[in-house]
Image (spheres, rainbow, N blue to C red):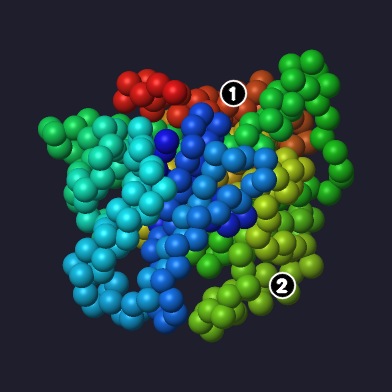
Amino acid sequence: MILIFSPQEWSHQFVSKHHYAIEFSRLDTVYFFEPVQCGLGRLSINLYNPYLNNKNLNVLRLWLPLPYFLQFKAKSLFNIICKYFINYVIRKYNIRAKILIDFGYHDIIKTWTFINCKTKIYFPVDDFHNLPISLRGCNYFWSVSKNVCDKFNTRKIEMNFINHGLNRQFAELARERLKLINNNAWNRAGSKIQVGYSGNLAISFLDRELILFLIENFPDCDFNFYGQYKYNGNAEFLNWIDKLKDFKNVHLFGQLAVEDLSRSLFSMDILLICYKPDFKNYHLENTHKLNEYLSTGLPLLSSRVSVLNNDNFYYQIHSSDLQNTKKMFEMAISEVNMPNTTLMAMRINYALRFTYEENIAFILKDTFVTF
């Protein structure tokens, strides 16, 4: 059995925690704990299976009848109460885990010493500025951020870096495209160049000025945005969305399920990552969408990504040098018009090294766990 503690709820909008849960469920029974919720109402312990065809995947939703402010104003008390009920759930369902994985449950539980499990993995994904520097009772450490590994550096256990995973939907499409490329059978579809961006349009480190610059300077290209944009946000955010809607060559699609998102991105010609570092939540280091983008083989325009040593894989852009950004975009268009299939294959093969299946095999080998 595998215990996964996630700071995100289960939803159709998957991030790494959900993908790891699905892949691990191919090996053994998984219990995916959502963040504990509290507020008015009755105690609720809801264990459910989100997929009829996957009996190994179980999602645990725990609702505590406590004042909402308790988790912020009395954290120690809140942690003790959560610890009690998580222990209760583990006993109730007779969960005997081989592996415990904590993806960032630090706001709810301080340490996992109370759970009897031989292999406990702390796996912080996001490099938040307020991330508590504690191993939390775990004996293994993994992160997709080298910066996080450096923060937690200790002689007690090894700090292991692992790249963001590539889910099965993207991997399957990538292998199909790679087969076409190797057989000299791949051809671009369509005439007008389609540019794709996948991600939340409300994130603080999104380089909005750079995106607007590209839209304005390349009116003959369609810019397609896949990600949440319908928020009751502040005036600045709403103004930014209104600006996007004013352009005839901009299309906002909102959130898509992973199957639809993968097909949509594979239908693009150019893909965008437009971030600017705030050195609190983003450090120009890595992003989960990088391998998804590379798996398409398509030209990628991105602000600097330090995890990607091979600069030939992408065209680097930044709002501090708009003239060079325009030049990089023109080079990407040239690649669309005259595809470099060798480079496309290199991008795809790089991404396929980091499927979730491969990442899990790597983790199990390092932790000496077998199923």
Q: Residue at x 59, y 23 (%)?
A: 349
* Quarter-of-image position of residue 247: bottom right
Q: Quadrant of the C terminus?
A: top left
Q: Residue at x 30, y 53 (%)?
A: 87
The percent coordinates of residue 38 (x first, y second) are 39, 73
**Left or right: 356 as drawn, with respect to 245:** left
Residue 284 shows in the view: no
Of mark 1 and mark 2, the one earlier in the sequence is: 2
Q: Residue at x 38, y 42 (%)?
A: 95
Residue that sits furthest to the left in the current view = 155
Q: CA distance from mark 1 to mark 2?
A: 36 Å
Q: Quadrant of the N terminus?
A: top left
- The one nearer the camera, 112 or 130, is 112
According to the picture, the residue beneath numbered tag 1 turns out to be 349
* Quarter-of-image position of residue 56: top right
Residue type of the residue flagged with mark 1 = Asn
**Left or right: 326 as drawn, with respect to 268:** left
- The one nearer the camera, 34 or 224, is 34
The percent coordinates of residue 334 (x first, y second) are 72, 37
Q: Is residue 141 above or below residue 227?
A: above
**Could you tell me which secondary element the residue under label 2 belongs to?**
helix
Q: How many marks?
A: 2
Residue 174 shows in the view: yes
According to the picture, the residue beneath numbered tag 2 turns out to be 245
**Left or right: 357 as drawn, with respect to 340:** left
Q: Is residue 4 above or below residue 89?
A: above
Q: Residues within 10 Å of mark 1 (few under 14, many from 20)?
A: some
The percent coordinates of residue 329 (x first, y second) are 64, 46
Mark 1 vs mark 2, foreground winner is 1
Residue type of the residue flagged with mark 2 = Lys
The percent coordinates of residue 143 (x first, y second) are 35, 40
- The one nearer the camera, 12 or 83, is 83
